[in-house]
Amino acid sequence: MPSRRSSLSSPPVAQNRVQPRSTPVSASAKARRRARTRRRQAVVLSGVVLLGLLGGGVWAIKRRLTRTPLVALTLPHSIDPRIAAAEKIAKIQSCDVAVLGATPSGVAAALSAARAGAKVVLVEPRPLLGGDLTYAWINQFDVPIKGIHSDHSPIDYGIFGEFYQKLGLAFNPESARALIEEKLRAEPNIQVLRNTSIQHISLDNGRLRTALLLSGGKQWIRLVASSWVDASNDGDMAAKAGSGFFLGREQANPDRAMQAAGLFFKLKNVKWGEIREYTRQCRALPLHEALEQKPTILASTDARLRGNKVVLVLGGGTGPYAWERGDIVKPYVPHMPDVDVMSINFGRTGKNEAILNTLNVLGVNGLTKFSRLHGRKQAIRELKYLVPFLREHMPGLEKAELAGIAPELYIRETRHISGITKLTAEDVKRATMFPDRIALCAYSMDLHPYKKGEPPSGTRRWAFTLPLSSLIPLRVDGLFVASRSLSATWMAAGAARVIPVTMAAGQAAGLCAAMCAQQDLTPHEFVADATKVIALQDALREAGVDIGDNAPALAQEARPNQR
């Protein structure tokens, strides 16, 4: 009996073998066979390459969808099976006006549209409302304190005025968020969707019509709106829809650098009376020394020329708000490579507490999460050195201790959307009276450094008007942009980026969006009709807004910078 090994190694039976040919193969037949084989190999190889390319493209799209919070791609559904499948199961919801972002400007837009009778859906990707008020701890409103003929602020009107009158110049961020919640609850026409992101948008001949949303509960919603307001800080929806934009100071410098970001932090054991006493003091400097320290010093209303000396107030403020002019932090040398320290702004939040705005981080790209987190880490490390320095040098902070750090950096600049009209620095300086003006604004062209060693600019407060057409993207219809990303040059954006201006833009955009929905008009059609624009301006006046009627008189006043 053969062994197991020998049986396994035995050759197969004859009929299963390949029989040898009885006749030789000709050379021409061999050549034809080789050609056929090469053709088959080429077809197989092409298929493999094509499948690899398609697989890589789908992987890249899916990777982008998972990494980007706001994805508004107009890709065919056949390329993205996830979107195609979601479209089939999405709950359809409609409204007159949809607002993206519960930022201060987004809240103003939603309130304005709802009060005009529109059904509003406010979409917020995060759990808390308030934008920079909540997440960056901005607790200081940048407004001129007095008007020409009274102590009333010239821009303390409209929806921003409602918040300013309740909160004041400085406030606790929690109070601001609570007021936002209260205002929105009081409007039955507003539905707030928290933890809801926009996954896909659809354009119809260049007009924004619908968006596919994904709620925190993993529910898909297809939102259909007559008009849209992009109140996201970075103009996300407008950019993804193809509106076109500039990044940072790209219009003047190809480096695309953005203004320094800021980290707000809270100190406890603060002696407010001593801080205010210091900021009220004056000191005299030789004229040449004053000009060396700050070339634009004579443009400040707090500087007085007496002979060959300049008498300068060391700071300013009123009530719970105060600032020093940089004398305290001038000798401070930052330890982190990208950190810069500027004059201190104090916003009182309690009896012995204040939030400080002084710490800046250069080189932050506000559009990328990694850059924002990296910049914030640097700023937090710097606090280990800065807080002891302030205890030693700033009156009123001798016993101060760190009591909290803002959850996020304050991003001052990212995109500038390409709109029908672009607000320019000359428009700000000359107080251009735009035919379609919708708000009176007052702020300096406050540009924080873009690179190490660059000085900040902005000492004079300008009064200027904001045109409706700067809120309307040039290449996309059906959409308003009411945030710091509105259409402006990088210098003019330094004056238009602050909350009082963006809330005024939001109020006008919300009201105009409601009027467009009621009259079945697009923003492009609306702004092209002078009678419609006049009707909007009259409606804003009735709502208590100064649309710039007092701008020529206010433009004659120079105001000190308040960051």
Image (cartoon, grey):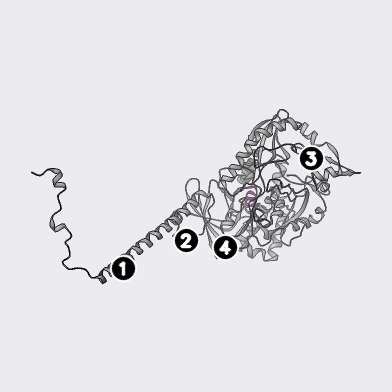
- Of mark 2 and mark 1, the one earlier in the sequence is 1
Disc 2/disc 4 C-alpha distance (Å): 17 Å
Q: Nearer the viewer, mark 2 or mark 1?
A: 1
Q: Position of residue 20 (x, y in %)?
A: 17, 62
Q: Which residue is mark 4?
A: 207
- Position of 441 relative to 287 (above/below): below
- Magenta-drawn stretch, dominant element (helix, strand or loop): helix
Along the horizontal axis of the image, is 533 left or right of 221? right
Is residue 153 part of the magenta span, yes or no? no
* Horizontal side of residue 21 vs 213, given as left or right: left
Q: How far is mark 2 from mark 1, CA to CA?
A: 40 Å
Secondary-structure class at tag 2: loop
Reading the image, the residue beneath label 2 is 76
Q: Which mark is residue 463?
A: none
For mark 1, what is the residue? 35
Q: Does residue 21 appear left or right of residue 245 in this picture? A: left
Mark 2 or 4 closer to N-term? 2
Amino acid type at circle 4 is Arg
